[in-house]
Amino acid sequence: MKPNPSEAGKRIKQLRLSCGFTMEELGRKIDNSPRATISNWERGTNLPNPQKLKLLSTITNSTIDWIKWGTLEEYITSYLIDIGYELYIKDFPEIPHKVFKDIQERYSNTFSLNKDYELLNPIIKNIFTKYYSKDFEDYRDIEVKPDPKKVGRKIRSIRKKLGLTMQEFGYEVSNSPRSTVSTWEHGGNLPNKAKLKKIADIANCSVEDLLFDEGFISEKSQVKLINELKEENSKLKEKIKYYECLFDGIESLLNSRKNS
């Protein structure tokens, strides 16, 4: 798992300010790194190399792992998201804290909990499994994450098959506004857990089918969808041609005035 450069940059800035250093002063202490380098770290453009990261942690009396990941609890959250439980963590944000407390109670005498976080990965995963409910297996995305655009096309197919407008469909899905349905269908984001379940019930399928099944949309629906996309593309081309002609006309008018 790679650290988030933006979040690490915020921590580097926090350390620098807490030590009372300017960027120039901190740079001089870290192998005479220029101010621009410190600025790049703090803005999240890149991370210090291992040697400078170690020097930075020593100078600021912190740890390499804290600079890279934050607290152990923050690391646990990032790790669980990285191995595929992002949707679950969004629905149950208290879980990383529970895992952290368990580790703290059971392993604080065995491991140093402020460094070498990655050594705890197997333990984190093992403790997490006791909290992870199999009722939410549909939302697990370890091997593949749902593509919002593909899910959006499925939602659109379901709505069209039912003969509902976006507004009518939204009413059936917990009174969601038309704009929300439009966002789903265009792949802007995914419905939340409860609304995914509602849509799956309406379509008489599982949430897993809705999120991942490539063959979910029937062949007839696929053909219809392709034809609709072709029609939209044709209309778009007509609009482009119209504006090209309009701009050509404006350009000709401007040139004629300039020449006269």
Image: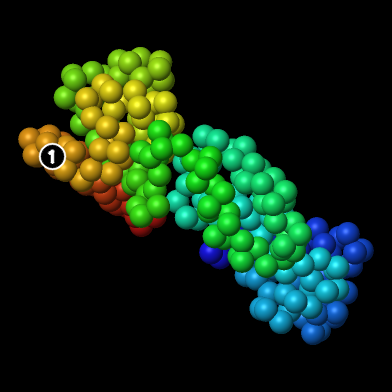
> Can I make out residue 43 in this image?
no
Could you say which quadrant of the image residue 67 lies in?
bottom right
Q: Nearer the viewer, residue 151 or 186?
A: 151
- What residue sits right under mark 1 in the picture? 222
**Residue at 35% from the left image edge and 45% from the top image edge:** 146
Q: Amino acid at mark 1?
A: Gln
Q: Nearer the viewer, residue 1 or 46?
A: 1
Residue found at the very far right of the displayed protein: 20
What coloring was used for the rendering? rainbow
Q: State left or right for residue 254 relative to residue 244.
A: right
**Residue at 40% from the left image edge and 15% from the top image edge:** 175
Q: Position of residue 233 (x, y in %)?
A: 19, 43
How many residues crowd mark 1 within 10 Å: few (<14), some (14–19), many (20+)? some
Q: Nearer the viewer, residue 249 or 71?
A: 71
Q: State left or right for residue 129 relative to residue 25.
A: left
- Disc 1, SS: helix
Check the image and report above or below for 210 versus 117: above
Check the image and report above or below for 153 versus 197: below
The number of numbered badges drawn on the structure is 1
Q: State left or right for residue 32 relative to residue 41.
A: right
**Residue at 71% from the left image edge and 63% from the top image edge:** 111
Could you say which quadrant of the image residue 15 lies in?
bottom right
> Can I make out residue 172 in this image?
yes
Q: Position of residue 224 (x, y in %)?
A: 11, 35
Q: State left or right for residue 134 relative to residue 40.
A: left
Residue found at the very far bottom of the displayed protein: 31
Check the image and report above or below for 8 versus 129: below
Q: Position of residue 179 (x, y in %)?
A: 40, 26
Q: Position of residue 94 (x, y in %)?
A: 62, 37
**Residue at 66% from the left image edge and 60% from the top image edge:** 69
